[in-house]
Amino acid sequence: MTELRFDGQVAIVTGAANGLGKAYAFFLASRGASVVVNDLGGSLTGSGGSAAADSVVEKIVASGGKAVANYSSVENGSDIVQTAIDTFGRVDIVINNAGILRDVSFKNMTDKDWDDIHAVHLRGAYKTTQAAWPHFRKQKYGRVIVTSSAAGLYGNFGQCNYSSAKAGMIGFGETLAKEGAKYNIVTNIIAPVAASRMTATVLPPGILQYLAPEWVVPVVAVLVHPSNTTENGSIFEMGAGYAAKLRWERARGGLVRCDETMTPGAILAKWADVNDFTNAAHPTTTADMVSYLRQSNALPPNAPGKPVRFDGRVAVVTGAGAGLGRCYALLFAKLGAKVVVNDFVDPFTVVNEIKENGGTAVPNKVSVEDGDAVIKAAIDAFGRVDVLVNNAGILRDKSFQNMTDKMWDEIMNVHLRGTYKCARAAYPYMVKQKYGRIVNTTSTSGIYGNYGQANYAAAKTAVIGFSRALAVEGRRNNIFVNVISPSAGTQLTANVLPDEVVKTRKPDYVAPIVVLLCSDKCPSTATGQLFESGCGWQGRIRWQRTGGYNFPLDTPLTPEEVIKHWADIVNFDNGRADHPEAAADSRARIMANIDRYAKRAKSDSPVSVNYVAAIEQAKSARSAGTILSFTDKDTILYNISLGATKNQLPLVFEQHPDFRVLPTFGVIPATTATRPFNLQDIVPNFSPNMLLHGEHYLEIRKYPIPTSGTLVSFVKLVEVVDKEKASIAVVGTTTKDAVTGDDIFYNEFSLFLRGAGGFGGPSSRPSNGRSTTAYIVPVRSPDAVTKETTKADQAMVYRLNGDRNPLHIDSTFSAKGGFKEPILHGLCSFGIAGKHIFEKFGEIKNIKARFVGIVTPGQTLVTEMWRDGLVVRFQTRVQETGKLCMAGGGAELLGTTKTHL
């Protein structure tokens, strides 16, 4: 096959200094493209310098390629595109890759956490792509990639902001595909899983070694090549040699008669039909509502079904002054709810209508952008909030080329940010009362994309991602979150649909399913789901994913090889397609391919590799340094994740004169740092599923420990010990202050690699000070004992520090590891024990322990401590089982006085 080339083309890659972006830039340049390497050079949180892009450019030029650096934020997309025009005279490809993280549970999310994510991911993609669009149209050629993620497709705990922004890419990309088609502008959406700064904390280290960006780049190269004229507006999932395509799948649905017998109970009676995917459709536009209405009118009156009531409940409906919102409010009131009628123009008419019918309601005339004021109306009037229907909306339709920033921002502010603000204000009340029902509003323009609605479509699919992530978080507090895509004639659609269609698509025909989703009668499985409704018909929408293709992990992947198997990647009809519902379903496919490779590698057992030499080479490998920027909020989060309470103000209040971070915070920058070597290259038969964290040693090299700043961590391989049937890899990480260069922490941890020994390496490790000291607890009773019961959600909170191994949140993943339920991170237990020593004896100089057992969230940790001068020996056991979870522990005290918290 002829090699795919990009000679004469100019590509812009945002976020191109690291990870995927860097790999895109290198590859495109190697195939003849001139590349604009855009990067702020920032950390995961978006801060940092701009020299990182220069390094990539220098390497490309040194290899004979053409590249130029650009340091602008993607929010200034026109500057990035202008660099391409000024330097190379044109632009042909835009790969929107730049991204940051602001992971935090929804109840703790700030507006800044929300706004920063959307500014970079969603608005940045809009600004950069729109700046290139006139050039694409003029030359009748362009290729665009927008980057989503598993979090965007399925939702993910602690990522309501990120899931929202990444889901927004779907509607945005689908709309660009429709607008650009006649100009030969092709846009596709990718959801990659690759080892990068942004994923280094999501999956275990052993797994990350198989997630090189080079497994994603060839698929993207096929999509942005001139030869791709068939895939446009498509969605692809890829990583670790696996690639598949996704599409929307619509249920056959349930149809009822549109009359006064169309009640929530009538919809409930048809619930099996609503979720029946027999002979499912795979649409690219709205359902045929005219046909459904004709069929509906031919049906007999509906059976009443189970009664649905809202007595004692309080419902907030936004945009309730007319149309859909009015119908929702009237039906809630009719069924016993007390209603807050929110509308920026006129809530009073509907309130009066409700009161005239004997109901209870109060008006709220504020913008949904002030969600606090919307929910305050419910609390002031009724003392609680049980139901929130986010319905408010506006339109600012315009072709993408002519869309203004004002049009983009106004749509985002009302539809997306307004939904977030109202939900954020209501959520604490719902958590406290252990009950809540939220229905958010998307549209078919969002699900399938629509010409002239890039802003609206992006906002509406972003609402889906937000809802799915919030459903994940809310479930344990009996908070259900769903999404409705209504088809109704309203003021909002009056200028979009023909007049006769507007008149027949009554909002009354959508209200029953919305009200049902907000009720106690709604099936418990209905959360995080998407429903389309109108004209008596309602059906669920879900993803369908091809079986895809699994490329072998022992052979470098090329675009040419991808093309050979393209038919397999996009085949929905070979019986291998499935229907993923959660991020774990995305990981499962990737894990399966990794497992296949690991088993094959083990059976092949190559003996020709000189692993001893490979280890020595890995020891000399130099780390580029991994940046971690953090603020006092991150400090407080870490302390809280180890059980700090409101009564320990120095740990939770940034303005306290003794504000501090617990000393074991030092493990965070180390465990998220990138290694300059791969484990599979230095031991035989390596399998990520056979990897265990054995021992951990932390040394605090400078006090006071900073509570905010920028750190840079350098990783090295210390030693690999051959235990015949296993091996132990010892990894050391030095963490420095990025500004002063001072050492702050040193971590050393051993990784026990089962089945990866017998290669002729050393059988023991030489002594190396405190990191190799063997601590043996005395026979006498301990000098101090501290008991602490972990919280049921402690694992969920701890993983927000950065190391979000799915083993600690996803029951499917933990089951594969042999655990009945997700377990507490070993370093969380390590931190809690360190806190116990800190509370009893003061600041510590270093601490070490060996992990010997698991802890399930909710169990009680008992730390037994023996002091001998400045050394504290300790062990930690699980009270409920009596078994040790950490043994051989030792800490050297700094010699300061006991700390009082």
Image (cartoon, rainbow, N blue to C red):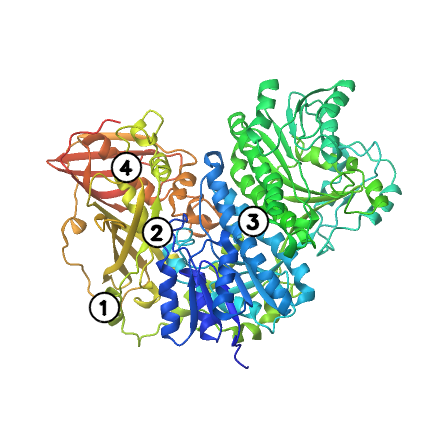
Residue 154: mark in rendering:
3
Is disc 1 placed on a helix, strand or loop? helix
Camera sees residue 550: no
Q: Does 885 sit left or right of 497 as displayed?
A: left
Q: CA distance from mark 3 to mark 2?
A: 24 Å
In the rendered structure, are the residues bearing label 3 and label 2 in contact, judged by CB atoms less than 8 Å apart? Answer: no
**Type of the residue with mark 3:** Tyr
Is disc 3 placed on a helix, strand or loop? helix
Q: CA distance from mark 3 to mark 4?
A: 34 Å
Q: Which residue is mark 2?
A: 672
- Where residue 585 appears, x then y in whole percent? 53, 53
Q: Residue furthest front?
A: 86
- Where residue 555 appears, x then y in whole percent? 44, 73
Q: CA distance from mark 2 to mark 4?
A: 18 Å
Q: Which residue is mark 1?
A: 616
Q: Which residue is mark 4?
A: 662
In percent of the image, x 18 and y 32: which residue is there?
841
Q: Does 263 sit left or right of 521 as displayed?
A: right
